[in-house]
Image (cartoon, rainbow, N blue to C red):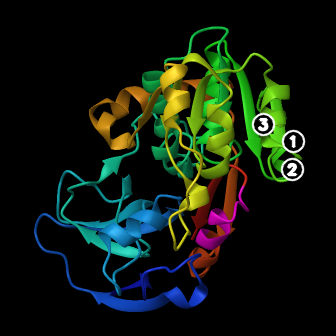
């Protein structure tokens, strides 16, 4: 008998998520049927997308959405041997039964010295988001200036490093001195604390007086209003997220952006990383190679204990993490 523990969403979030919005439940799992596998989660991911998507995808009382690295405990499906590791999207749960659909194996050549949790971070969805969003949409060229906000997060920290690999100048914004130190360690050329500067416009101008060729957008709101004015003609903007707006109960308003897009002839495009799903193996292979070569550094913000998932999620939305936020069993 296996008992699965799961965190459910009691109610849809109003404003910032609160502890009382979550409930821990237990459920006894049934015996396996032919073709099924039983998996045990070892690492879980918390990500910004969970905040807006929970409203769209979940009903109140559903298990909270999310991904994990899980190990096969029992199998009645020869394609999924016991002991195999897979990335799954089974939500915030300790154990689950799968028919195999949607289980993504870790690459067979996964280096023994790399933590498997990287399949949720630098070599997983966040890394792929950075890889395809920057390279396919921003199309950075050697010598370009690339601006990244939320630069010390799971995606932004990878974006800046890929920009450097491609011969660009990387400018990053983050919200603490510790985060700025981390950005310097991983190779960002210019960094600033958006919480302490007297003027975002002045900070952006100081970091790159001639403006920006590429802008990888994770934050939205007032930061975007200031950054669009600093773009060079024919600049490219990849809109990955808008975390500053996710907890707003009433939609924010800001300056009208059309004149900047028009007169600077900017290209601005939003994206969801799954559009490149058929190319994930290509991206993951390259990310792993850069990690092995030491060109791509990573940092994991580890929280121990499944019972701490809501706290980790709420902390991530407040920007408490450096690098990828991971929960470890």
Q: CA distance from mark 3 to mark 2?
A: 22 Å
Q: Callout 2: few (<14), some (14-19), or many (20+) C-alpha neighbours within 10 Å?
A: few
| Residue 172 on the magenta segment | no
Which residue is painted at 71% across and 20% down in the image? 211
Report helix, strand or loop for mark 1: helix
Q: Which mark is residue 181?
A: 1
The C terminus - image quarter = bottom right
Helix or strand or loop: what does disc 3 sit on?
helix
Percent position of residue 135, x then y: 48, 22
Which mark, by number, is residue 201? 3
Q: CA distance from mark 1 to mark 3?
A: 22 Å
Q: How many marks?
A: 3
Rounded to the nearest angstrom, the CA distance separating label 1 from label 2 is 5 Å
Kindly indicate the quadrant of the structure image that contains residue 248: bottom right
For residue 289, above or below residue 125: above
Q: Which quarter of the image is occupied by the N terminus?
A: bottom left
Q: Secondary structure at mark 2?
A: helix
Say whether disc 1 or disc 3 marks the residue closer to the N-terminus: 1
**In the rendered image of this protein, does residue 55 appear above or below residue 299?**
below
Q: Is residue 296 visible?
A: no
Q: Position of residue 279 (x, y in %)?
A: 32, 29
Circle 3 or circle 2, nearest the eye: 3
Q: Is residue 319 one of those drawn in magenta?
A: yes
Q: Which residues are magenta?
A: 313-321
In the displayed structure, 319 sits above or below 112; it is below
Q: Is residue 301 above or below residue 268?
A: below
Left or right for 113, reference 267: right
Residue where numbered disc 2 is placed: 178
Verify CB contact (< 8 Å) between mark 1 and mark 2. Answer: yes
Q: Nearer the viewer, mark 1 or mark 3?
A: 3
Q: Nearer the viewer, residue 115 or 257?
A: 257
């Amino acid at each position: 008998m296996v008992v699965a523990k799961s965190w459910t969403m009691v109610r849809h979030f109003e404003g910032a998520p609160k502890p009382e919005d979550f409930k821990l439940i237990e459920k006894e799992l049934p015996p396996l049927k032919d073709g099924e596998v039983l998996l045990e989660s070892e690492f879980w991911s918390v990500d910004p997308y969970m905040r807006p998507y929970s409203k769209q995808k979940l009903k109140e009382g559903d298990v909270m959405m999310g991904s994990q690295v899980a190990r096969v405990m029992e199998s009645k499906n020869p394609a999924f041997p016991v002991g195999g590791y897979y990335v799954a999207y089974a939500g915030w749960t300790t154990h689950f039964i799968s028919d195999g659909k949607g289980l993504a194996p870790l690459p067979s050549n996964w280096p023994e010295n790399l933590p498997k949790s990287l399949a949720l971070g630098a070599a997983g969805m966040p890394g792929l988001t950075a890889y395809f969003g920057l390279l396919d949409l921003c199309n950075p060229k050697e010598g370009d200036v690339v601006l990244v906000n939320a630069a010390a997060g799971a995606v932004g920290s990878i974006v800046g490093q890929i920009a450097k690999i491609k011969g660009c100048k990387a400018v990053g914004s983050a919200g603490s001195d510790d985060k700025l130190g981390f950005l310097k360690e991983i190779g960002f050329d210019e960094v600033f604390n958006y919480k302490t500067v007297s003027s975002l416009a002045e900070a952006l101008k100081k970091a790159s007086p001639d403006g920006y060729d590429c802008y990888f957008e994770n934050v939205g709101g007032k930061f975007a209003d200031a950054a669009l004015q600093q773009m060079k003609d024919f600049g490219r903007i990849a809109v990955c997220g808008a975390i500053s707006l996710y907890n707003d109960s009433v939609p924010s308003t800001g300056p009208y952006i059309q004149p900047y897009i028009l007169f600077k002839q900017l290209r601005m495009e939003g994206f969801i990383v799954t559009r490149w799903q058929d190319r994930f193996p290509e991206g993951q292979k390259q990310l792993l190679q850069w990690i092995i070569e030491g060109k791509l550094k990573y940092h994991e913000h580890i929280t121990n204990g499944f019972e701490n998932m809501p706290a980790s999620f709420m902390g991530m939305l407040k920007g408490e993490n450096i690098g990828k936020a991971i929960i470890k069993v």
